[in-house]
Each structure stands twice: as structure tokens, then as C-alpha cells.
Image (cartoon, coloured by chain):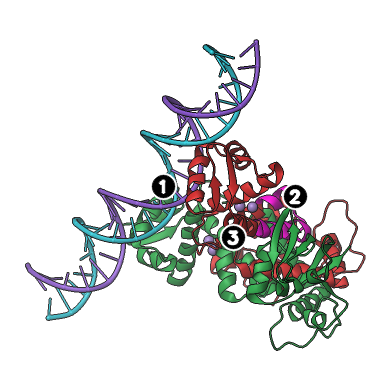
Chain colours: A green, B red, C purple, D cyan
Amino acid sequence: MTDHTLDPTLTPALEDYLETILRLSRRFEGLVRVRDIALARDVKPGSVSPAMKRLDELGLIEYERREHVRLTERGAVAARRVDARHRVLRRFFEGFLALPADLAEQDACAAEHALSPETIDRLVRLFEYMEMCPEGQDHLQRFHRCSLVHADVAPCPNDCPGDPIALAERTDQMSIADLTPGQRGRVRQIEGQGAIRQRLLDMGILPDAEIELARVAPAGDPLWIRLQGFELALRRAEAASVKVQAR
Amino acid sequence: MTDHTLDPTLTPALEDYLETILRLSRRFEGLVRVRDIALARDVKPGSVSPAMKRLDELGLIEYERREHVRLTERGAVAARRVDARHRVLRRFFEGFLALPADLAEQDACAAEHALSPETIDRLVRLFEYMEMCPEGQDHLQRFHRCSLVHADVAPCPNDCPGDPIALAERTDQMSIADLTPGQRGRVRQIEGQGAIRQRLLDMGILPDAEIELARVAPAGDPLWIRLQGFELALRRAEAASVKVQAR
DNA sequence: ACGTGGTGTTAGAGAGACCAAACAAAACCG
DNA sequence: CGGTTTTGTTTGGTCTCTCTAACACCACGT
Ligand SMILES: [Mn+2]
Ligand SMILES: [Mn+2]
Ligand SMILES: [Mn+2]
Ligand SMILES: [Mn+2]
């Protein structure tokens, strides 16, 4: 587990309260009401009040009258810390992994409580590197073009061997379905879209995984593979979209 | 919030229980005892029992007698799903971000419950791309050499403009300390090690951030900057290690 | 001045995790 | 076999987070 809430006294929920108070302060010039917080966090006001009380006791906000909430200096420091991590992650998810904005936002706000400061630091170093190195930019774009295939994308102009479109047209690729029972291989790439790909990943069929074709059903359709000491059944179509390096 | 526990009925804690049961089954050939689970998760046996009861009710394990715990088929599917995400993240943290193994492990097990399937998918695509594209490998290594500086590393042989060692020797770089009061700039890189860097990142001083030198103390040492609508004090030494693009 | 609606607080309740300690059942052993 | 140790369960308690619903303000308009 290990909770990386930077301030050991802060739970994820309290961090999120601080974060939204910070944002609302920016918007409303420090005039943050319980109602706004409840709205922003999508909880009922009755949940906010006791949380404010606790943040007040921790000295992170000033909880005035029955009106405004204001971050103390310590509270603002904590809030900016959470906000900074949030932004680092959002940027990584959206700018680097090319995730849709809403998902990037969601995942950032969930993961910001879970990652060590070192991890955030490494991501920032990655940004720095990508920006400074002209090749870094090129490469990122190529990754997006080649790998995050949308229906209407042309094959990678750089002749990148990993380009899924180019790959699909190749014949020298071997899939799980081409293995002979008992033969082992290393997963290189998972083709296929959406649900199928998702299912394969969920099962643990990931790049570099050691895999063995255990047996094939008499009809030829369900294939059984061994993976991490377990046997799994794959439909032939699924197996065919897992490219492997036989050995 | 939005919990990406793939099975909506599963909390992070239950996912972790499934995950450790899966691992222990691999080790002990399916003979998993409550005691082992408690040990592995670092909780007391008294916490494990009721959790097993719930997993049993959910049809994810068979909770036999007072002896062994065994995953059902549905439970194994769920467990492998968690395990797959865990491995994807661990690999990203360790192999790509070059995080120490223990931190990679920790963060993977925390973040595995927080990220959307799409995000995991994108990371896998990144692995595929990096492996397939020979340049990808080169580039990753250069990132590690250039950017994750250890004390005894030589400057980047590729003359990468982002190389921190090369950067430190340059004089055409401007830092926050070189701005004139009222001048604005965009953060390009944060130099400095450990605690100082950490403090800067925590304050929200991140690559691409818009920043303004608000004023300088008479003594010249504390500098005040504006960032995201807030004013922060920086010691001169800290400010000097933030490289900016003035404008 | 009075009522009404919008806000904030409080009390009560439930779910999820966890622990400590009392208790029960096996296993182990002399 | 009978006692001791190991292992598992149960009970009672704490904490956090949330909700609902009753209640307290306050502000505004008539
Ligand atoms: Mn959050
Ligand atoms: Mn957030
Ligand atoms: Mn976990
Ligand atoms: Mn895990």
C-alpha cells in the first residue's frame, strides 16, 4: 500500500478538498463557499462541513463563520503540491500518452495520491528531455502516428518496423496461432482493437511475456496457452492477433 | 474520484487480496493459507478472515474449511487482470522511468487501482513501440544517460541540448534570478538535486509554467514570483536553478 | 416585520478497513 | 494420549468517508 500523501496526516479525500479549494480560490478570489466545494467534488454539503472542520483543526484552512473558507499558508503549500502532481500527471497522460482529455483528468486526479515524489520527478525529467531534445519531439510524434492508430492514419512514413499498419501487411510475423503445441515464444506485439485487445491485456498477454502453446482443441478453435504458470483458453482469432517471437 | 476497479464490486483492498492470493497460489501450488495472506499484505489475520468471507460471497474464491483459499475461475480472471496492470506499471516505472525497483513496485501496486484501462493500454503501446523501433531504444537510453544524472555520468555523447551536464556549463541560459522585476518567462528546465528540486516541483514550478518575477527583496535574496495567480518566495539559489525562456 | 428559499451544520446511520484480544480448532510432540 | 503451539475466527472498537434528513441561519422581497 504505502500512501504517498506527502503530508502523512492527509488522506486522499482531504488532499482533494485542498485541491478544489485552491482551484475555487483562483476562480472566486478567495471567496470559497461550502456549496461550491460540494458541487465541484460532487458530494453533498453535509459531507463537506466535517471535512472543513478537520482541515481547520489541522491548520490548513481558515474556516470562517458560516461563509468563506480560506487556505492558510501551510494549506496553500499542501494544495499546490497536490495540484502540481495533478498537472504533471495530466500532462503526461494527455500530451505523452495521447489520452483523451477527460480520461487524463480523471486518472491524474486518482493517481496523484498514489505516486512517490520520485516518480513525479522522473516524469518531469522526461518532459524536460522531450522538450530539449529536438529528436525527442520527433520521436514522440512518431509514436503517436505509428502506434496510436486511428482508422484514417497512413502507415508510418519513417518505415518504423513497429508501425501497426505496416505490420498488419507483413507475412513474416508469427502469431500464437502459428505455434505448434509445446512450442514457446515471447510476446512481441498485441494487435487488434478495443475489446479484443483489452481482453488480451487483461489476461496478462503483454509484450515480453513468455508464453507456451499448450494444446489445441480437436476442432481447432479454442487454443490453450500457458502463461505465468496458468492455462488460459484463447479463441483462434484472438491468438492470431498476438505476434510472438518463437524460440 | 472515479474508481477504475475493473469489476465495479471490487474495492482496491479486495483487488489487492486477490492479487496476493494469485501470487501465493503460484508459489504454493494453490495451498494458500490466511496466515500467508496476512503476512504478504502486512495486516493481521483478523483482517483477512472477513475479507475472505466477502470474496467468497462474491464467488471469487473458494474459502475452504479453516485451511486453504483457492481462486475460482472468475476470481483468477479478476486477479490476473490486477496482476497484469501491476506488471505494466512496474515495468514502466522501472524500465522506462528508471525508478529503483522498490519504488517501482510500491507505486505500481498503488496506481494499479487508479488508472483507466485506456491508460494501461497506452503504456503497453509505448512498450511495443519502444521495442520495435530501434531508434526508440536508443532514445530511451539517451534519456537515461542524459537526464537521470548520477554523480559519475559523463555529458551526453550525442550533444543533446537537454543534457543537464552540458547545460550546467552553458552561459546562455537564463534563470529566474536573471529576470528583471515584472518580466515574465516560461520555465524550461529545473536544475538542482534532491530536496531543492523537490521543493521547486512541489511549488508548481514545472516545465512550461508561465512565471513572472514579481519583486526582489531589498537585500536581494528572497525573490517573489507570480505563478498561477499566487505569489511565492524563492531563495536566490533556488531561483537560479530554474532555467527560463524570457519573453 | 414576516415568510420563503438558499445555505450551512448537525445527528444518525452505513460501508469499508483495520486492530487487539478473546476464543476455537488443528497440529504437533513428548 | 494430553498438553502446548500454531493457526483461524469472532467480537468489539476505531477511523474515514459518505449519505439523508432535520435543523439553524440569513438575506431578500414583499
Ligand atoms: Mn485527486
Ligand atoms: Mn487532482
Ligand atoms: Mn495494489
Ligand atoms: Mn499490485
Q: Is mark 2 within 8 Å of ligand 4?
A: no
Q: Are marks 2 and 1 in contact (CB under 8 Å)?
A: no
Q: Position of residue D4 (x, y in %)?
A: 57, 15
Ligand 2 image-quadrant field: bottom right
Mark 3 vs mark 1, foreground winner is 3
Front-lying residue, A194 or A21: A194
The residue labelled by disc 3 is A111
Q: Position of residue B21 (x, y in %)?
A: 62, 47
Question: Dividing the image into 4 quarters, which one contains the C terminus of chain A?
Answer: bottom right
Which SS class for mark 3? Answer: helix
The residue labelled by disc 1 is A57
**Alpha carbon separation for disc pair 3 and 1:** 26 Å
Front-lying residue, B235 or B17: B17
**Residue type highlighted by circle 1:** Glu
**Is circle 3 on the same chain as circle 1?**
yes
**How crowded is the residue under tag 3: few (<14 C-alpha within 10 Å), some, or many (20+)?**
many
Q: Position of residue B190 (x, y in %)?
A: 72, 62
The residue labelled by disc 2 is B101
- In which quarter of the view is residue A209 placed? bottom right
- In this rendering, position of residue A45 left or right of residue A191: left
At 82% from the left edge and 75% from the top edge, which residue is drawn? A162
**Residue type highlighted by circle 2:** Ala
| Magenta residues (range) | B83-106
Q: Main secondary structure of the magenta part?
A: helix
**How crowded is the residue under tag 2: few (<14 C-alpha within 10 Å), some, or many (20+)?**
few
B15 within the magenta span:
no
Chain under callout 1: A
Q: Is residue D13 above or below residue A185?
A: above
Q: Is mark 3 within 8 Å of ligand 1?
A: no
